[in-house]
Amino acid sequence: TTRRSLPLMGLTAARRLLTHPTEPASYVCVSDTGLYEASGGGGYDTHSGNAEDTAANFDNMLQSLLGIINTPGENDPTKISIDDTLVILNTEFGRTPGRQGTDGRNHHPYGYVTAFIGGPITTAHKGVSGAIGKNGYATSFATPAENRIAAMLAMGMWPFAAEGFNVSDVPGATTELQAAQRSISKFLGRSV
């Protein structure tokens, strides 16, 4: 029996919205619910079977994502251009570095990864911002607010409107301009 891939269906819908010939979407969010349901629900809530479930679901998501992106020189109008599209791989929290039970991992918001790929992130700007120590806790990090601020700036949106984020969400910033410059420099790898 062939299993239907909900992540592939979501990414295919995103591709169609982003590559529409006359009215392409500016922003699309796809939630990866996994190819297989994890023990805690969804694709990644792995209170047991962490290695198997995460490997199968993450591999499926990455393969599905690669299938909708033009390879260098391909120029297929029905696929997205990674040069023009920012892909953000984000999670609400990570998994504990130590086991839960025999083969699971519990919730762990103290050290996890968010990846920004494509769009304004080029090979000249690639890199890592932050670090996770041997104990699984972040030693330097971006807050969820900082990640969202950087994403909005990358998409050309001003994140400091009254209904958005505060300057104080960016440590050390005292003005909107300074907060934007720090975010662009730290998370998008560009000097302003």
Image (cartoon, grey):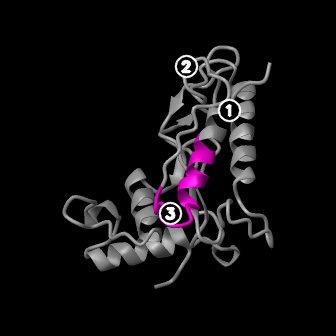
Q: Residue furthest bottom?
A: 192
**Badge 1 local density, few (<14 within 10 Å), some, or many (20+)?**
some
| Left or right position of 3 against 174 | right
* Type of amino acid under label 1: Ser
Looking at the image, which residue is at 65% across and 62% down?
A: 80
Q: Could you tell me if residue 129 is visible in this image?
A: no
Please provide the residue range marked out in magenta.
10-27
Give yes or no for residue 69 being in the magenta stretch.
Answer: no
Mark 1 and mark 2: span between their CA atoms? 19 Å
Q: Which residue is mark 2?
A: 40
* Type of amino acid under label 3: Pro
| Left or right position of 148 against 7 | left
For marks 1 and 3 on the same chain, the one whose residue lies earlier in the sequence: 1
**SS of the residue at dot 2?**
loop
Task: Provide residue 153's location: percent of width, then percent of height.
Answer: 42, 70
Q: Residue furthest top?
A: 101
* Type of amino acid under label 2: Gly
For marks 1 and 2 on the same chain, the one whose residue lies earlier in the sequence: 1
Q: Which residue is mark 1?
A: 5
Asked if the residues shown at circle 1 and circle 3 are in contact, with their CB atoms under 8 angstroms apart, the answer is no
From the viewer's perspective, is residue 40 above or below residue 32?
above
Mark 2 and mark 3: span between their CA atoms? 36 Å
